[in-house]
């Protein structure tokens, strides 16, 4: 870091009496700030509404009255000349101020050094993003949005914080899921390291969303499911999934025989994996579809899983188990931008085929209901059928899953 230090002889006693007068502190401060910014010590500096003592000290410094207006103005060249001519500071005003106040850090150089330190702090995140392409955009946003600087404050603190974030993310996703406190204790030195509100939790959770594609949201339930999307469980009972006519455990067999819906918790799924008992399983977005299937077909309905909106940790765990067991998964959701985002989030975690959920299906449904609710929100992609996005943009009608019950139920027997 570049400094301006004392270089020449200075008559310290006389300097303190002349320029070290407290009534001239404002002048010394202005000079010091100019030196920090590498600005020339020329031209006037002014003080508005000066005290009489400040005017008197300026007169003593210059050897003349500085005037009697509303402000006090001193030209720096004059002060420099006085100091040189008197022998108090042969090297002039800059040397005198350094002698009075100490070495001066050049702010331009200091800022450059600080910026280099910030760049070095992000190096561990850049390395992680290089190894995990899905994190590249997140790393760029993290560097540019100022969040790390606000949370950490200094480059040194940021380097330690981002190192822990990289440690956590490089171990994710976890399969099978594990307790969030246990994960934090094992990798980050404390069971509470990822508690809500900590800088480490904030940054790690943002990285998890980039890693898993988990959508934006707020609230305790959203955070719980966001952690769970990477296999980190805040608890095993709050995350559930709604099913109909799955089999494989005594409880599921009993409910399937009765044709009644079942609610499975993440705890149950972790401890007792559900085997695929049918070659295909249908997936819907809304509970009304599953309830209608139970009412219409009962025990004769094909197996059905309901996401109830965004796929929960329990739903992802169940569908992964069914896929690994050999079941083909078929998905249907709302024909709107939110529905496409939910479907895309699920597709990133488990493979599925569209169940009446293509551009052709949407066009037929939308043309049959031209007076349906208008489509709104930001467009989303449909990786399983790229034409679906264009179809929604052209017809601009929302088609909710519940309005297609007749055709969906016909596929479940």
Image: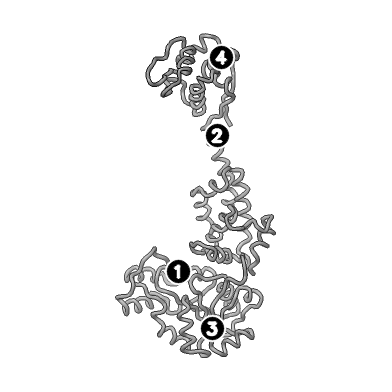
* Residue 47 placement, left or right of 181: left
Q: Which of the labelled discs sits on residue 17, or is there none?
A: 4
Q: Earlier in the sequence, mark 3 or mark 2?
A: 2
Q: Which residue is mark 1?
A: 383
- Asked if residue 80 is positioned above or below residue 360 in the image, the reply reads above
For the residues labelled 4 and 2, the Cα–Cα distance comes to 32 Å
Q: Which of the labelled discs sits on residue 110, or is there none?
A: 2
- Asked if residue 20 is positioned above or below residue 299 in the image, the reply reads above
The quadrant where residue 388 appears: bottom left
Of tags 4 and 1, which is closer to the observer? 4
Residue at 61% over, 54% down: 166
Q: Secondary structure at mark 3?
A: strand
Q: Quadrant of the N terminus?
A: top right
Q: Earlier in the sequence, mark 2 or mark 1?
A: 2
Q: Nearer the viewer, residue 253 or 144?
A: 253
Q: Are marks 4 and 1 in contact (CB under 8 Å)?
A: no
* Image coordinates for residue 122, horizontal then vertical, percent: 57, 48
């Amino acid at each position: 870091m570049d400094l301006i230090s004392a270089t020449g002889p200075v008559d310290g006693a006389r300097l303190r009496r002349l320029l070290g007068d407290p009534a001239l502190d404002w002048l010394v401060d202005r000079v010091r700030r100019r030196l920090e910014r590498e600005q020339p010590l020329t031209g006037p500096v002014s003080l508005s509404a000066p005290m009489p003592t400040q005017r008197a000290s300026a007169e003593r410094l210059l050897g003349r009255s500085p005037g009697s207006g509303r402000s006090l103005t001193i030209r720096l060249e004059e002060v420099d000349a006085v100091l040189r001519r008197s022998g108090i500071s042969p090297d002039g005003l800059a040397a005198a101020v350094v002698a009075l106040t100490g070495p001066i850090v050049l702010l331009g150089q200091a800022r450059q050094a600080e910026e280099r330190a910030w760049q070095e702090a992000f190096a561990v995140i850049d390395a992680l993003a290089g190894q995990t392409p899905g994190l590249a955009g997140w790393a760029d946003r993290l560097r540019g949005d100022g969040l790390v600087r606000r949370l950490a404050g200094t480059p040194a603190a940021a380097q330690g914080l981002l190192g822990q974030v990289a440690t956590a993310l490089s171990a994710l996703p976890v399969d099978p899921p594990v307790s969030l406190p246990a994960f934090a204790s094992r990798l980050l030195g404390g069971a509470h390291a990822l508690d809500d509100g900590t800088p480490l939790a904030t940054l790690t959770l943002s990285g998890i969303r980039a890693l898993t594609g988990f959508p934006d949201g707020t609230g305790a339930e959203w955070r719980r499911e966001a952690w769970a999307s990477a296999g980190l469980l805040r608890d095993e009972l709050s995350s559930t999934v709604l099913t109909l006519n799955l089999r494989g455990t005594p409880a599921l067999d009993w409910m399937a025989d009765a044709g009644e819906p079942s609610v499975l918790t993440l705890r149950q799924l972790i401890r007792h994996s559900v085997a695929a008992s049918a070659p295909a399983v249908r997936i819907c977005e809304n509970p009304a579809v599953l309830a209608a299937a139970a009412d219409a077909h009962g025990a004769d309905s094909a197996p059905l899983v309901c996401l109830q909106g965004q796929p929960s940790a329990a739903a992802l765990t169940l569908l992964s188990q069914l896929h690994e067991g050999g079941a083909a998964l078929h998905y249907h959701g709302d024909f709107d931008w939110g529905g496409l985002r939910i479907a895309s989030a699920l597709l990133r975690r488990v493979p599925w085929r569209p169940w009446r959920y293509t551009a052709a299906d949407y066009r037929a449904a939308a043309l049959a209901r031209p007076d349906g609710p208008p489509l709104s929100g930001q467009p989303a992609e449909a990786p399983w059928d790229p034409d679906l996005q264009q179809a929604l943009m052209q017809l601009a009608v929302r088609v909710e899953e519940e309005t297609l019950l007749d055709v969906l139920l016909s596929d479940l027997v």
